[in-house]
């Protein structure tokens, strides 16, 4: 074989899912596990992938080369719902959703009008993502444009693909955190023009949730979506029963919570709704019909006592779903810990969550939910080279458990049950190692 131009080569054990699937039972046949594999990276993308034996002659003598013989390499984790301004208030005690917002969230987010402060937390936030193996995230900023600039600037330094947006919120919040329908439209429009499609940055129109936006503001959000159809919509839906009752009181003319968003043109491809714990059947049907997506946030749903998300129903109703950490109601940046809780949420409903299905939701399924599965989620040629190197034996207990693992699926399940940030050995973004555990 002749050598293939590569800026970097990585050898090791690789595991991914080759294509999107329509049922949980379809995932195992789509699994691709290569015990001794090779990936070639060029200009931030995957230029070759296969076994070491087939690929070794493609390497030139001067190609930078890393070998991880005792690690496991998987696509980067994708977080479909997280709040960057809530980083410092993780683990706030004692409340459910609406009380939690007033007691903890709003006072914390007030600080992000200060650009220097926003810069500081944005740098910390991005480093936490990388340390936890998250290579792409859909992110809430605060109501302040400064928070959006700070986050995109921090992501840009790492060549990281992030989707984010300014919160739109013009009622039922402290005056200092409220914008107006007009100002939110003009600020969001300016941020779209500034950031959407710049490098790997993408923008999301971000009404916090229906109760904190007037009909006039939701109309403006829908106008933005119509004017910029390739941007995202990111908001919350049916997280808490008191929240749902509040929405029905505020919008009595709509058929339900989701119908509020649908009425204003905010459902559709690249519309991601966090939580969806208590959807009604008609809402599930609307999610499917509009190709909208759900972010499943198990640590948050358990921490705030919101309820148990029916993950099985996403397969039955053919609704796209990704995994969200939901920092700071969620309790960890780490998708392994998030999957540990996701498994328990399903157990409490009499359902199972396999290791392979878990990997799907954290990687290719998340990419599909974000309409990025043509760019991310597995090791297919031409995709962006975001991946992580996992140490399955980061603790003595993990090492003991892995010695008894019966194949790769059992090894992966043990990792997802016991794992955390200590298992992230190296994180690659756009072909370069940007975090290495020392």
Image: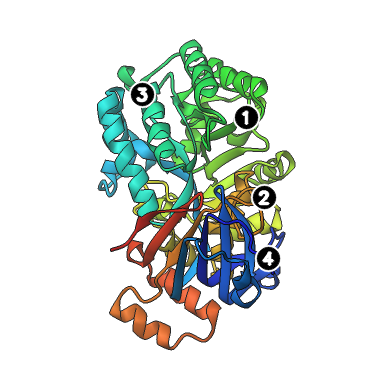
Measuring from the top left, give residue 185's x and y in whole percent.
52, 16
Residue at the disc numbered 2: 319
Q: CA distance from mark 2 to mark 1?
A: 16 Å
Residue at the disc numbered 1: 266
Q: Is residue 319 above or below residue 67?
A: above
Mark closer to the observer (1, 3): 3
Mark 1 or 4, nearer chain start? 4
Question: At 67% from the left edge and 35% from the top edge, which residue is drawn?
Answer: 268
Q: CA distance from mark 2 to mark 4?
A: 45 Å
Question: At 72% from the left edge and 59% from the top edge, which residue is drawn?
Answer: 22
Residue at the disc numbered 3: 146
Q: Nearer the viewer, residue 71 or 294?
A: 71
Mark 2 or 4, nearer chain start? 4
Dot 1 lies on which element? loop
Dot 2 lies on which element? loop
Q: Are marks 2 and 4 in contact (CB under 8 Å)?
A: no
Q: Is residue 104 above or below residue 15?
A: above
């Amino acid at each position: 074989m002749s050598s293939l131009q590569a800026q970097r080569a990585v050898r090791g054990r690789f595991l991914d899912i080759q294509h999107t699937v329509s049922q949980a039972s379809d995932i195992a046949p789509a699994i691709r596990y290569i015990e001794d594999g090779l990936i070639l990276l060029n200009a931030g993308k995957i230029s070759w992938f296969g076994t070491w034996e087939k690929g070794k002659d493609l390497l030139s003598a001067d190609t930078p080369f890393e070998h991880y013989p005792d690690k496991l390499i998987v696509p980067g984790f994708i977080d479909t719902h997280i709040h960057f301004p809530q980083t410092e208030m993780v683990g706030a005690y004692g409340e459910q959703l609406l009380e939690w917002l007033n007691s903890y969230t709003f006072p914390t987010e007030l600080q992000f009008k200060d650009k220097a402060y926003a810069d500081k937390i944005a740098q910390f936030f991005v480093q936490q993502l990388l340390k936890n193996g998250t290579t792409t995230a859909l992110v809430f900023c605060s109501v302040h444009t400064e928070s959006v600039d700070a986050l995109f600037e921090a992501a840009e330094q790492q060549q990281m693909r992030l989707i984010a947006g300014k919160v739109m919120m013009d009622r039922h919040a402290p005056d200092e955190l409220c914008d107006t329908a007009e100002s939110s439209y003009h600020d969001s429009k300016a941020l779209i023009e500034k950031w959407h499609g710049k490098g790997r940055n993408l923008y999301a129109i971000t009404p916090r949730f229906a109760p904190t936006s007037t009909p006039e503001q939701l109309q403006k959000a829908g106008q933005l979506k119509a004017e910029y159809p390739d941007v995202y919509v990111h908001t919350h839906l049916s997280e808490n029963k008191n929240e749902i009752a509040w929405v029905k009181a505020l919008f009595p003319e709509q058929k339900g919570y989701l119908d509020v968003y649908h009425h204003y043109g905010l459902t559709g491809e690249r519309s991601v709704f966090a939580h969806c714990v208590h959807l009604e059947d008609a809402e599930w049907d609307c999610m499917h019909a509009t190709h909208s997506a759900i972010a499943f946030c198990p640590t948050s749903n358990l921490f705030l006592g919101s309820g148990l998300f029916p993950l099985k129903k996403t397969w039955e109703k053919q609704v796209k779903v990704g995994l969200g950490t939901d920092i700071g109601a969620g309790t960890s940046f780490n998708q392994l810990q998030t999957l540990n809780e996701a498994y328990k949420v399903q157990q409490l409903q009499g359902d199972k969550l396999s290791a392979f299905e878990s990997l799907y939701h954290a990687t290719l399924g998340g990419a599909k939910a974000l309409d990025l599965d043509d760019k991310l989620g597995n090791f297919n040629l031409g995709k962006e080279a975001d991946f992580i190197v996992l140490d399955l034996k980061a603790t003595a207990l993990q090492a003991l458990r892995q010695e008894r693992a019966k194949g790769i699926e059992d090894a992966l399940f043990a990792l997802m049950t016991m794992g955390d940030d200590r298992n992230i050995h190296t994180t690659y973004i756009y072909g370069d190692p940007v975090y290495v555990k020392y």
